[in-house]
Amino acid sequence: MTEPSRISSLTALLAPHAERLEVDLADWLVPPETPASLAEGMRYCVSGGKRLRPAIVSLSARAAGGRETDEPVRRSAVAVELVHVYSLVHDDLPVMDDDKLRRGRATAHVRFGPAMAILIGDALLTRAFGVLAEGSVPLAARLAAELARAAGAAGMVAGQVADMDLCDVPAGFEGLQYIHRRKTAALLRASARMGAWAVGADPRALRAVGEYAEKLGLAFQLIDDVLDATGTAKQLGKTPGKDAPAGKRTYLAEVGGDEAHRLGRRLTDEAVEALGPLGPAGEPLRDLARLLAERTK
Ligand code: GRG
């Protein structure tokens, strides 16, 4: 039996985590001696967004019995958001997805030019690991390894290589799962595991939040595909309807709308089930899964 959600809106659930993140970004985003033009670009790209991944870090830390205000948790939250934003900036480039609109504003390459957009992405990615390593975080190497695995050549980059048809990928639904496990779910899983690692979670809690976030990531991507086909630019803050004409593999193209909705519900249920071992401490993560399943942007 699933209990009713205690928090009724995604915005309300994410807000306190987003507020803490803003404070930490103000302190940690731009290292001393960064050229002003690059600093401006980094700040521009990092602003806005739902801040979903930092919230997963914090809520996983709490679900594992720790405090989200601890420095290792806060540094992990900043690091995952920086990796996420770098991936958006590079994905939007003319040589990749060639997107003009992101988070309701011009993409980095439209605003600053493609060379600067590449460099902003580079700066964000390297800064993520700097933020993890610079604090007094005893587990920094462990946290960095988790993030590198999710973001790197066997994780998010592999997902993008597959999505751009730059490697062999199985046909059909299996290929789609291959891409989204790496491109989307890997960073959500790492966010959850880093939150748990950062507070010294036991292996059972680590496994529970990792499995939860992997399923959540797949459900999240599925909803993203549905929204791309049905949403508006105003609602989404990015240009919708690009997947089908670009010949992209999407859940909608692969299995159709009804099955995509069924699969989304199943993945959300499986994400929630994975939290079983955490008991009531997992409740905010359950709320998050339910609210994400209902999102319209
Ligand atoms: C360039 C190595 C490299 C990878 C790019 C992550 C990615 C791969 C591309 C981004 C585009 C995309 C469709 C990613 C799938 C994950 C996803 C739905 C991202 C959008 O995440 P939100 O909705 O964005 O959390 P905000 O702006 O709210 O943070």
Image (cartoon, helix red, strand yellow):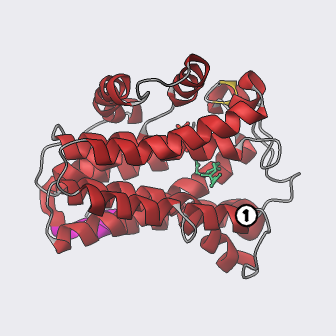
Residue 71 versus residue 186: which sits nearer the camera? 71
Residue drawn at x 25%, y 64% is 1
Q: Is residue 67 left or right of residue 55?
A: left
The residue located at (23%, 45%) in the rendering is: 73
Tell whether 248 sits left or right of 50: right
Location of residue 230 in the rendering, given as x and y in whole percent from the top left corner: 72, 42
Q: Residue furthest bottom?
A: 170
Along the line of sight, the residue nearer the viewer: 7 or 197: 197
- Kind of residue at disc 1: Asp
Counting labels gives: 1
Q: What are the residue bounds of the magenta stretch?
A: 272-277
Judged from the image, the secondary structure of the residue bearing numbered disc 1 is helix
| Pointer 1 residue | 163
> Which quadrant of the structure image shows residue 27?
top left
**Nearer the observer, 201 or 250:** 201
Dominant SS type (magenta): helix
Residue 22 is one of the magenta-drawn residues? no
Tell me the quarter of the picture where residue 154 sits. bottom right
Q: Position of residue 264 (x, y in %)?
A: 53, 61
Does the closest atom of ligand 1 sit within 8 Å of the Cβ of label 1?
yes
Q: Say which quadrant the C terminus sits in.
A: top right
